[in-house]
């Protein structure tokens, strides 16, 4: 946790210097808007980093707590079968997992305290920005007054040395106020363009990077234009950067509150349509809520936070725990229905000759209680899912084999992300079998077929 402490101390020191300077009006007026913006940006970045670390730690604690409960059940089952050695092993692993949970508690507390301190620092800095905006009109009045006094001074020039000295002093005041007024004018332009409002917004307005590397560096390496999966307008600003009002507003019903449905609802509402979004679950987010549980993907949940914020700024209505049926569509009678219900897990045809348990990735990530023993993860996509499921099971103390139909796991992932996950697989002692597809199962074995052989 020392890295976060040092980062916080650095940011807080800079923030404190800015706050100290703000106590003196002259120094406050001399602070440029660019420096103030830079200070606030640094604090926001540190706040997002620490919040993401805290969330990741909480997810790790949840996974370990699930492992503790699972190992306790394993121990009871082993004792019931008279297998004391297996019961002792399960209890030993349970104690190790509980020790990890206990060690995480002070780290979690420290991150929470750092997050609160940064929030206080950010609030103070934002207040100084608001104060600067308030002083703008005062500066205009001071500048006008200085010009008027200067005109009187010029008409009375030469009457006495005292008046001449006063005129020089007023001229110096005028120059300083004119400089300040120029800066205030620049800030005024930023206010009118909406840039300064972003500085005074809430943390959720910041689209924090979720470290997917897909449309940015991933597109670059693949030879495509750079963009961002969180803001698809990026790189297409001329075409999509401005929301044109619809010539004829329509009633739009959107089925599904995942990323696609949320984005569609936000854009349609911004264009003036009457939008209602129905989500069958009790929370927006769709499969992103599963993806963020995978090891190394906790930041991915930030996509939901960002889209919820974007959607909340519109007039779109959201109805949770509501499944879209033909009856609902007839009842609502919309002009347009957008289907954004996502996908379902795919299960290939297998020759099944026994009772070996078969589960999909949703079961694993969702916390389904699986029987103990060796687990084979079969991945024919080469993306996050197979890698993540294998890592998650290995971190629960299971023996895992990852069978992939490519030359290596994660072939569809951006290379930096893939390399980090391959290193994690190696550390977790996951066995990788390349170039195979699933064929069938019986009571004891999983059968795989080499993809390059008949």
Image: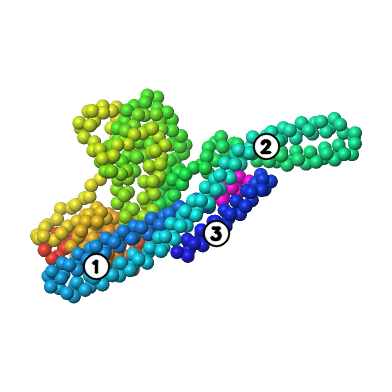
Q: Is residue 37 magenta?
A: yes
Disc assigned to residue 10: 3
Number of other residues with Cα within 10 Å of mark 3, as a class: few under 14, some 14 to 19, many 20 or more? some
Q: Position of residue 19 (x, y in %)?
A: 60, 51
Closer-to-camera residue (4/112): 112
Label pair 2/3, CB-CB below 8 angstroms? no
Q: Position of residue 284 (x, y in %)?
A: 32, 43
Stretch in magenta = 31-40
Number of other residues with Cα within 10 Å of mark 2, as a class: few under 14, some 14 to 19, many 20 or more? some
Residue at image x 83%, y 39%? Answer: 166
Numbered disc 1: secondary structure: loop
Disc assigned to residue 399: 1
Closer-to-camera residue (225/373): 373
Which quarter of the picture shows residue 130? top right
Position of 186 with respect to 434 (left or right) is right
Q: Which residue is mark 2?
A: 139
Q: Is residue 97 above or below residue 227?
A: below
Label pair 1/3, CB-CB below 8 angstroms? no
Numbered disc 2: secondary structure: helix
Instruction: Give the spatial CA distance, label 2 vs label 3.
Output: 33 Å
Closer-to-camera residue (405/431): 431
Number of other residues with Cα within 10 Å of mark 1, as a class: few under 14, some 14 to 19, many 20 or more? some
Residue at image x 47%, y 57%? Answer: 114
Which badge, 1 or 2, is on the more N-terminal residue? 2
């Amino acid at each position: 946790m020392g890295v976060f402490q040092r980062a916080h101390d650095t940011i807080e020191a800079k923030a404190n210097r800015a706050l100290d300077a703000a106590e003196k009006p002259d120094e406050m007026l001399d602070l440029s808007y660019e420096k103030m913006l830079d200070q606030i940006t640094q604090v926001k970045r540190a706040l997002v980093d620490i919040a993401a670390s805290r969330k990741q730690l909480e997810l790790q604690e949840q996974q370990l707590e699930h492992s503790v409960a699972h190992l306790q059940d394993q121990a009871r089952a082993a004792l019931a079968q008279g297998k004391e050695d297996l019961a002792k092993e399960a209890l030993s692993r349970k104690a190790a997992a509980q020790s990890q949970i206990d060690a995480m508690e002070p780290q979690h507390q420290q991150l929470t305290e750092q997050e609160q301190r940064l929030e206080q620092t950010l609030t103070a800095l934002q207040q100084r920005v608001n104060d600067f905006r308030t002083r703008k009109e005062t500066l205009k009045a001071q500048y006008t007054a200085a010009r008027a006094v200067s005109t009187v001074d010029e008409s009375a020039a030469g009457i006495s040395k005292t008046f001449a000295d006063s005129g020089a002093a007023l001229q110096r005041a005028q120059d300083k106020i004119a400089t300040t007024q120029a800066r205030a004018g620049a800030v005024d332009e930023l206010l009118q363009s909406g840039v300064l409002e972003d500085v005074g917004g809430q943390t959720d307005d910041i689209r924090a990077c979720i470290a997917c590397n897909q449309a940015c560096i991933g597109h670059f390496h693949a030879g495509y234009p750079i963009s961002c999966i969180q803001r698809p307008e990026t790189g297409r600003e001329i075409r999509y950067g401005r929301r044109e009002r619809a010539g004829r507003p329509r009633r739009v019903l959107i089925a599904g509150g995942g990323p696609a449905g949320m984005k569609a609802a936000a854009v349609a509402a911004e264009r003036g349509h009457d939008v209602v979004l129905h989500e069958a679950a009790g929370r927006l987010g769709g499969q992103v809520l599963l993806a963020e549980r995978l090891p190394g993907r906790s930041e991915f949940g930030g996509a939901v936070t960002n889209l919820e914020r974007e959607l909340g700024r519109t007039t779109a209505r959201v109805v949770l725990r509501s499944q879209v049926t033909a009856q609902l569509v007839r009842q609502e009678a919309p002009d347009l229905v957008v289907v954004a219900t996502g996908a379902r897990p795919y299960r290939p045809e297998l020759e099944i000759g026994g009772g070996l348990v078969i589960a999909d990735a949703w079961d694993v990530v969702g916390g389904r209680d699986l029987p103990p023993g060796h687990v084979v993860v079969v991945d024919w996509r080469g993306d996050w899912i197979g890698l993540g499921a294998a890592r998650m099971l290995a971190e629960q103390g299971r023996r895992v084999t990852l069978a992939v139909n490519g030359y290596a796991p994660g072939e569809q992932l951006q290379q930096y992300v893939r390399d980090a996950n391959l290193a994690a697989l190696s550390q977790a002692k996951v066995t990788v079998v390349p170039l195979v597809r699933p064929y069938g199962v019986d009571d004891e074995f999983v059968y795989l077929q080499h993809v390059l052989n008949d």
